[in-house]
Image: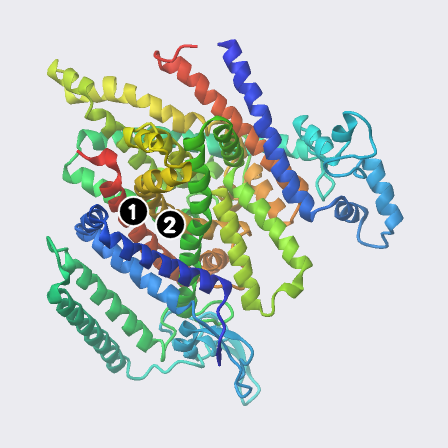
């Protein structure tokens, strides 16, 4: 087995490292640190942040890929992630068809011929389920979860007492509660997933708990990596338009008015269709289906980014126009500081709040957009696990009689919790950082 | 006034040319005249000669942006880009892969799209504004906080869930309305009730929050305090002062989308089987029919720009401070 990082893995990890570096840098700036502490002073923000970190942890776990080189294994040559390894028992052994959560037999009857040659319809038992000892396993799963949660909380408390807590205490209690609940819930589900399909199986018998966990990465990638595209575009163009004015301003305004006048979904659809045809013409670009899906995801992120920078750009331009009228910028100009220095040292730092608000605000919208785009047929690769693809399948399942509700349910819960947390967190960020909310 | 509107319309021309340039580059990068000829002529036994003949016949044998063989102005005008753009500007969208006239299709499908989009828009506007005013009246109370929590929750659910859940509850389990379909006239009401209701509900969260924030911004202004000091009741203050002054920011956000209502809703229409422009676009995307997608991109941009112009005009009508 050898490390085999996909392009999106590298980008996500570099985004993480970049974000952390920025965080460390910001710790030095007193005002910035105060603003952050202020954000987390709200218990709701604390709870949402813990949930977001939980999702992020899964995304990161799923972003370390290995290539299997072992010829003795059936999946030799494929690319699997750390999460795949942890979920090995649910990745490779699938059932024949639909089964409900915690079921022991298939959801639909199948025709069986018994020893006497008589055909009759019956529910076949599931192949990879061991129903005995439900309560013992449950206790065990929850016990491990509680122990783990308590241990980590204890360690964190010790670390805080070691002098890392400054100023007013933050609402740690709500954070611990959320963390404990999430950990216990997950460890219970994880332990149970060895004996059951905890969220049921889909049409071809794939485990939905595994599918939902895998979808986390897709959603988080789209929500975060798009920033990597929008931010530089919006920042460079917005600040130069506002600072230089004149024809530069006219040109950039023309650019973003043109782009934003094309209906978003249609522009994305056009871009993705173009990309699809291009990828069909060059099948030699990718070695495996995982890589193909990965490149497609990356293209989607780029297209989403290119179509969604205009709003932020407009705001940054307006704010730069305002700031460059301020006395301290005039003073800097009078001292002969060059334009780039003024923009980088005097204007950009004063735009941070707008950028941060827009990043957290866009995140939930992007996660939701993924589902819609997958439905339209211009989303992620159909072979890739994503909530959009799950909902897309669920549409037909809901029309069946009796209804197959669990794949819609799983996608709903996983998505709703993430988006709700992101929305609540972004509300708080906006409330604290937006200078209009001084009152 | 007239001159102002004329100037705004003229300003739209370079933007539309830019839109054309983007779509042209996107589509001709993958869907060259050769590919189009192959699709149109059918897959079997297409010789290069036939492709050439087809291209000459349709005028697709020209270079993309610059014609070196022509002379004078024709160096620029006798190109594929100018030819295709001028076709779009004349609303000549050509024929789809299924060899149907796209313009006729669009005309026929605008009605059903509007039948869903217009009621959704109007009902949503009235409900959102009234709920927002109600919450502003009770601001700071338990009602306000609870409503805001519910609003965030409504916002956090993907629109697809509302549609699927609505169809399952109202059509499959309770049999109140048909699950999908469309009919003209009064007959059609039972088909559009559910999509309209779902459309209104799914926008409720973000809508109410937006209007509420607009009204709250007004309520701290000095003129509101003066109105209260005059002895006006809180309800009077809200309706005759706050609502009136909130109209301007509302206009900016609302007028611009009115023309785009013609485009219909992609997802709503395809889920409910409504033969509008939204489902037309989705089908085109699924079938990779580039001619239709291109036409819809152009149409959407035109309608959006019309919306921008209407916004400016509505300003001059509603804001006495804006004089032209």
Q: Is residue A165 above or below residue A117?
A: above
Q: What distance separates the C-alpha of mark 1 from that of mark 2?
A: 9 Å
Work out which residue is located at the far right of the displayed protein and give it. B49
- The image position of residue A412, as x and y in percent, is 37, 56
Picture residue at 89% right of the left edge, 47% below the top:
B49
> Which residue position holds label 2?
A363
Chain letter for the residue marked with disc 1 in the picture: A
Picture residue at 36% right of the left edge, 83% below the top:
A130
Q: Dot 2 lies on which element?
A: helix
> Which residue position holds label 1?
A426
Mark 2 neighbour class, 10 Å CA radius: few under 14, some 14 to 19, many 20 or more? many
Q: From the viewer's perspective, is B193 left or right of B281?
A: left
First of labels 1, 2 by sequence position: 2
Structure colour scheme: rainbow
Q: Dot 1 lies on which element?
A: helix
Q: Which quadrant of the figure has residue A321?
A: top left
Q: Which quadrant of the figure has residue B280?
A: top right
Q: From the viewer's perspective, is A158 left or right of B283?
A: left
Between residues A243 and B19, which one lies in front from this camera angle?
A243
Same chain, marks 1 and 2? yes
Picture residue at 21% right of the left edge, 55% below the top:
A46
Mark 1 neighbour class, 10 Å CA radius: few under 14, some 14 to 19, many 20 or more? many
Picture residue at 18% right of the left edge, 63% below the top:
A176
Between residues B299 and A315, which one lies in front from this camera angle?
A315
Q: Is residue A318 above or below residue B227?
A: below
- The image position of residue B11, as x and y in percent, is 55, 22
């Amino acid at each position: 087995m050898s490390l085999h990082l996909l392009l999106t893995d590298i980008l996500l990890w570099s985004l993480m490292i970049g974000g952390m570096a920025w965080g460390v840098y910001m710790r030095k700036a007193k005002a910035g640190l105060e603003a952050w502490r202020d954000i987390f002073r709200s218990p709701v923000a604390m709870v949402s942040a813990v949930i977001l970190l939980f999702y992020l942890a899964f995304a990161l776990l799923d972003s370390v890929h290995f290539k299997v080189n072992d010829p003795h294994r059936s999946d030799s040559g494929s690319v699997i992630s750390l999460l795949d390894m942890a979920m090995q028992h649910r990745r490779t052994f699938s059932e024949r068809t639909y089964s409900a959560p915690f079921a022991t037999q298939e959801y639909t009857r199948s025709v069986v011929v018994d020893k006497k040659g008589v055909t009759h319809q019956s529910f076949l038992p599931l192949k990879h389920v061991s129903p005995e000892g439900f309560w013992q396993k449950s206790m065990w799963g929850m016990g491990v979860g509680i122990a783990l949660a308590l241990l980590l909380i204890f360690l964190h408390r010790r670390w805080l007492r070691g002098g890392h807590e400054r100023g007013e205490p933050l609402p740690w209690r709500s954070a611990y509660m959320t963390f404990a609940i999430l950990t216990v819930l997950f460890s219970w589900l994880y332990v149970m997933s060895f004996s059951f399909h905890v969220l049921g199986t889909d049409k071809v018998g794939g485990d939905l708990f595994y599918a939902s966990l895998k979808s986390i990465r897709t959603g988080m990638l789209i929500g975060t990596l798009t920033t990597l595209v929008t931010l530089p575009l919006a920042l460079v163009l917005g600040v130069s338009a506002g600072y230089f004015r004149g024809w530069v301003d006219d040109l950039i305004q023309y650019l973003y008015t043109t782009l934003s006048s094309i209906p978003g979904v249609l522009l994305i659809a056009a871009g993705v269709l173009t990309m699809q045809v291009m990828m069909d013409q060059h099948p030699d670009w990718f070695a495996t289906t995982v890589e193909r899906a990965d490149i497609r995801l990356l293209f989607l992120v780029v297209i989403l980014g290119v179509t969604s920078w205009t709003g932020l750009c407009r705001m940054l331009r307006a704010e730069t126009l305002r700031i460059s009228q301020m006395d301290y910028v005039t003073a800097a100009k009078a001292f002969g500081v060059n334009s780039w220095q003024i923009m980088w040292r005097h204007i950009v730092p004063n735009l941070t709040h707008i950028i941060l608000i827009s990043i957290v605000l866009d995140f939930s919208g992007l996660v939701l957009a993924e589902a819609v785009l997958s439905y339209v047929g211009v989303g992620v690769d159909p072979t890739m696990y994503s909530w959009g693809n799950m909902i897309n399948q669920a549409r037909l399942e809901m029309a069946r009689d009796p209804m197959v509700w669990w794949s819609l349910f799983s996608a709903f819960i996983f998505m709703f919790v993430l988006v709700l947390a992101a929305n609540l967190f972004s509300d708080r960020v906006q409330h604290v950082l937006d200078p209009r909310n001084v009152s | 006034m007239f001159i102002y509107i004329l100037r705004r319309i003229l300003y739209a021309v370079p933007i539309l040319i830019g839109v054309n340039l983007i779509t042209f580059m996107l589509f001709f990068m993958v869907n060259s005249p050769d590919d189009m000829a192959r699709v149109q002529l059918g897959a079997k036994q297409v010789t290069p000669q036939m492709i050439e003949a087809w291209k000459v016949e349709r005028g697709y044998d020209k270079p993309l942006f610059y014609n070196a063989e022509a002379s004078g102005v024709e160096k620029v005008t006798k190109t594929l880009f100018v030819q295709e753009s001028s076709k779009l500007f004349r609303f000549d969208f050509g024929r789809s892969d299924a060899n149907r006239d796209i313009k006729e299709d669009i005309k026929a499908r605008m009605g059903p799209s509007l039948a869903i989009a217009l009621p959704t828009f109007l009902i949503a506007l009235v409900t959102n504004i009234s709920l927002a005013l109600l919450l502003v009246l009770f601001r700071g109370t338990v009602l306000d906080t609870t409503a805001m929590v519910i609003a965030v929750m409504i916002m956090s659910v993907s629109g697809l869930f509302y549609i699927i859940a609505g169809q399952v509850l109202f059509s499959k389990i309770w049999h109140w309305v048909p699950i999908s379909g469309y009919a003209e006239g009064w007959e059609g009401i039972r088909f559009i009730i559910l999509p309209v209701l779902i459309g209104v509900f799914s926008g409720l969260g973000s809508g109410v929050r937006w209007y509420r924030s607009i009204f709250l911004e007004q309520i701290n202004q000095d003129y509101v305090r003066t109105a209260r000091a005059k002895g006006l009741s809180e309800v009077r203050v809200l309706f005759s002062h706050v609502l009136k002054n909130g109209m301007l920011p509302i206009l900016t956000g609302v007028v611009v989308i009115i023309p785009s209502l013609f485009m219909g809703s992609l997802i709503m229409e395809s889920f409910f089987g409504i033969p509008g422009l939204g489902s037309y676009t989705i089908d085109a995307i699924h079938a990779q029919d580039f001619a239709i997608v291109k036409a819809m991109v152009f149409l959407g941009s035109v309608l959006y720009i019309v919306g921008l112009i209407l916004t400016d005009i509505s300003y001059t009508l509603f804001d006495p401070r804006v004089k032209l």
